[in-house]
Image (spheres, helix red, strand yellow):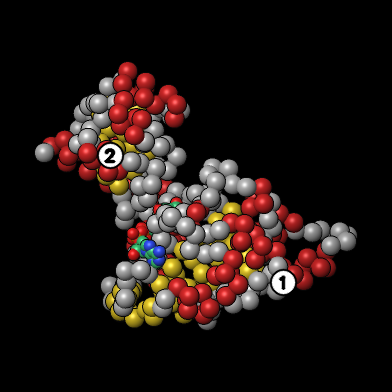
Amino acid sequence: MKVLANDGISESGRQMLESEGFEVIVTKVAQNQLIDFLNNNNIEVILVRSSTKIGKDILDACPKLKIIGRGGVGLDNIEVGYAQSKNIEVINTPEASSGSVAELVFAHLFTGARHLHDSNRNMPLEGDSRFLDLKRSYAAGVELRGKTLGIIGFGRIGKAVSKIALGLGMKVIASDSEVGEAKIELTFHNHQSIKIPIKTEPIDQLIQHSDFITLHVPAQISPILGAKEFGEMKQGVGIVNTARGGIIDEEALVEALEDGHVSFAALDTFADEPTPSIKILMNEKISLSPHIGAATLEAQKRIGEELATQIISIYQK
Ligand code: NAD
């Protein structure tokens, strides 16, 4: 029973599999060599994150595959239906990384609100002709407390984001194609908990009412936010996208940043991954991270262990 963890696996997940007799290979095999590697090494389980693609070519050419494990949530890099039609099980770990993605949203929100993404690149030294101007612009930060956070997509991550926002004293509005009324349960260290109702609104209203907007929907056929939506947002709004690149029209975003209507954006996912366009990379109003929402040590440990547990139980059936 051989497992190829092509995008890596946590040490604890690897140990769980090995203690049940699996051989775990952690070599990174290039996409165009994957078919040969899987067949030549009799691999039955392949584990991927977002970078390895499991398309019909691999599924047709590798009859020994039994399980495809996605460490994380989005399955858009896997031909799920086609795999299942060939009796290959597709598993993922939807809960394991929600808290980590939510914390990254706030890393970006605090960064944007206090211009840290820009000052990290451009902090002027005394004697620099830009010193006073830049210092003045960095000094014009805003607080998150009391501001309205619009959450588009109120599933696992959207809800995790709302809990942090409420803790910071933000107002929260949510918009979700499936969720009508929403309540969030906040649990404290003394195990007491309270339920807080969350206001839900259609996206067109949320856009008009939010000081900051964060997106948590799956991949979409067309962007949710484009020129029209940016134009309807509050002046100076900040936008965070840790969901999927294609859900924001990046050209329109750059224009809205350039004309100042949007004050900053933070992107963890891009229309072109892993190499976003130069316009995005070089824009000083954008805080960047390379699709690392789920990439904390804690989430990776949970992801590895959850995958191992599921694989072991499938083999025990
Ligand atoms: P989820 O399925 O729990 O929630 C998604 C929500 O979006 C659902 O409630 C759904 O009803 C809603 N939705 C779908 N289409 C919508 C639309 N057009 N308008 C409004 N609402 C819509 O998913 P999740 O676990 O919260 O993950 C959300 C996103 O985060 C996914 O795209 C996932 O791929 C991404 N993600 C990114 C990272 C990262 O590293 N950056 C890590 C994990 C997940």
Q: Residue at 66% of width from left, 62% of height from top? A: 255
Number of marks present in the image shown: 2
Q: Is residue 302 above or below residue 55?
A: below
Which circle marks residue 76 in the picture? none
Q: Quadrant of ligand 1?
A: bottom left
Residue with the most extreme top position: 40
Q: Is 290 on the left-hand or right-hand side of 61?
A: right
Going from N to C along the chain, the mark reached first, 2 or 1, is: 2
Which circle marks residue 139 in the picture? 1
Residue 31, x across and y down, in percent? 44, 30
Q: Secondary structure at mark 1?
A: helix
Q: Is residue 300 above or below residue 162?
A: above
Disc 1 marks which amino acid?
Ala
State the CA–CA distance, disc 2 to disc 1.
54 Å
Residue 80, x across and y down, in percent? 30, 43
Work out whether residue 11 can be spotted: no
Reading the image, the residue beneath label 2 is 82
Quadrant housing the N terminus: top left
Marks 1 and 2: in contact by CB < 8 Å?
Answer: no
Q: Residues within 10 Å of mark 1 (few under 14, many from 20)?
A: few
Q: Residue at 27% of width from left, 32% of height from top? A: 45
